[in-house]
């Protein structure tokens, strides 16, 4: 198969979808890999590294899209890429369709095969291609929150861990999944007092067993959230419904109950956000303020630590990418249920319920689509 790796062009997105090691693995399976010039520079990989691994360097993104049967990316295509996508071309990347109606309609119009990292799902309901970036974003959330609690950045002027004789910050984590667990762990390591909420009582029991003494668990419901935000200094949104919009656990009117300078970090922003007032921001302009509350809503947080993120991501995605390249997407998805669940849009048809529900679009039966390609 002919594989293309374009350079990511989303604001301050420095990750790359395939490392030189990944290229070498693809070459072992007799696939041809084209990499756009400087695509790996942000993650510490030179064009020479890719050439040594067996890739062919192309100077422009247009050439990469033009020649490839499968495009491997990190982030969803942006508007300037839409017209480069060919009918029937396989795109393997994060899409987060439920947060962008424009992107959804664009991929329907292009009749691409859109296989989303974030909905590839194992039998135990775990999301193997979302987990590594959730781990990175979860660990980054308290780090960013600690920074924006500083007074020059309009925060409350509180040190997350406090000092002897002065109480540490209060951190509220909404969601006890991968992001929330990692966020609570790091915030606790800073020395903060952490409350982590979830709707799953069994999960709260597990967290209670593994978390340090400065982390407490609490059932997530509207009343408990409304009370907890009154004393929280840093609130981290870590809610995920695979492939669908995140619910708004904190609404616009609840901001008035927060202390001035409270910091909100909504890691769920790429799925629409679990805080109503959050809208996607960039690493270039990461925050905005509403009602004296600082909102940090960067939609590609792991892009700020690309060396770590690229290696973590490709460790997870490469086996699936090789499977797709070896068998073709039709056979790979027919034989592998995990990949099959990654299909969101196929030849102009929405085949993933969460995406159809998000934008009130007709849902096409995936089995019927697969049969058409059999």
Image: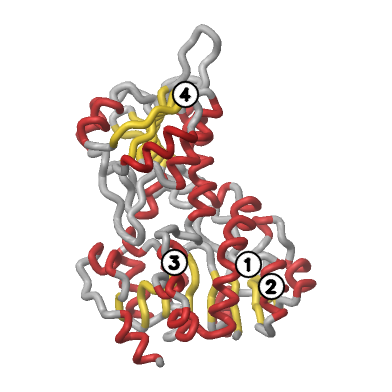
The dot on residue 264 is none
Left/right of residue 321 with respect to residue 221 in the rendered view: right
Q: Is residue 77 above or below residue 271?
A: below
Q: Which mark is residue 214?
A: 4
Q: Nearer the viewer, mark 2 or mark 3?
A: 3
Q: Which mark is residue 120?
A: 3
- For disc 4, the neighbor class at 10 Å (few under 14, some 14 to 19, many from 20) is some
Q: Is residue 363 above or below residue 118?
A: below
The part of the image, by quadrant, that contains residue 201 is top left
Residue 23, disc: 2
Location of residue 58 in the rendering, given as x and y in whole percent from the top left corner: 66, 77
Label 1, residues with CA under 10 Å away: few <14, some 14-19, many ≥20: many
Q: Which tag, 4 or 2, sits closer to the chain's start?
A: 2
Closer to us: 174 or 48: 174
Disc 2, disc 1: CB below 8 Å? Answer: yes
Q: Which residue lies at the image location 46% right of the left edge and 43% below the top edge?
A: 285
> Label 4 vs label 2: CA separation?
44 Å
How far apart are labels 4 and 1 at the CA level? 39 Å
């Amino acid at each position: 198969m002919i594989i293309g790796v374009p350079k990511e062009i989303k604001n301050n997105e420095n990750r790359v979808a395939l490392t030189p090691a990944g290229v070498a693995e693809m070459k072992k399976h007799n696939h041809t890999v084209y990499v756009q010039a400087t695509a790996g520079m942000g993650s510490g990989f030179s064009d020479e590294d890719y050439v040594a691994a067996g890739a062919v360097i192309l100077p422009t993104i247009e050439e990469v899209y033009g020649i490839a049967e499968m495009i491997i990316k990190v982030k969803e295509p942006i508007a300037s890429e839409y017209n480069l996508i060919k009918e029937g071309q396989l795109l393997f990347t994060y899409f987060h369709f439920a947060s962008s109606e424009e992107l959804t309609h664009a991929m329907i119009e292009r009749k691409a095969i859109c296989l989303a990292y974030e909905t590839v799902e194992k039998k135990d309901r775990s999301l193997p291609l979302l987990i590594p970036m959730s781990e990175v974003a979860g660990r980054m959330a308290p780090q960013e929150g600690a920074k924006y609690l500083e007074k020059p950045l309009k925060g409350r002027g509180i040190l997350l861990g406090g000092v002897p004789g002065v109480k540490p910050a209060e951190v509220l984590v909404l969601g006890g999944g991968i992001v929330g667990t990692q966020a609570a762990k790091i915030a606790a390591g800073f020395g903060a007092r952490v409350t982590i909420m979830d709707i799953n009582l069994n999960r709260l029991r597990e967290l209670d067993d593994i978390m340090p003494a400065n982390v407490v668990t609490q059932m997530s419901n509207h009343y408990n959230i409304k009370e907890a935000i009154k004393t929280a200094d840093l609130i981290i949104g870590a809610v995920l419904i695979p492939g669908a919009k995140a619910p708004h656990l904190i609404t616009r009117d609840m901001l008035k109950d927060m202390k001035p300078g409270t910091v909100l970090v909504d890691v769920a922003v790429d799925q629409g956000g679990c805080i109503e007032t959050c809208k996607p921001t960039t690493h270039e302009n990461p925050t905005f303020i509403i009602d004296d509350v600082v909102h940090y809503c960067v939609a590609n947080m792991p892009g700020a630590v690309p060396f770590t993120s690229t290696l973590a991501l490709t460790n997870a995605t490469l086996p699936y990418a090789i499977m797709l390249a070896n068998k073709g997407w039709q056979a790979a998805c027919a034989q592998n249920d995990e990949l099959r669940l990654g299909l969101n849009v196929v030849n102009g048809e929405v085949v993933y319920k969460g995406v159809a529900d998000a934008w009130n679009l007709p849902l096409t039966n995936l089995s019927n689509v697969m049969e058409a390609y059999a």
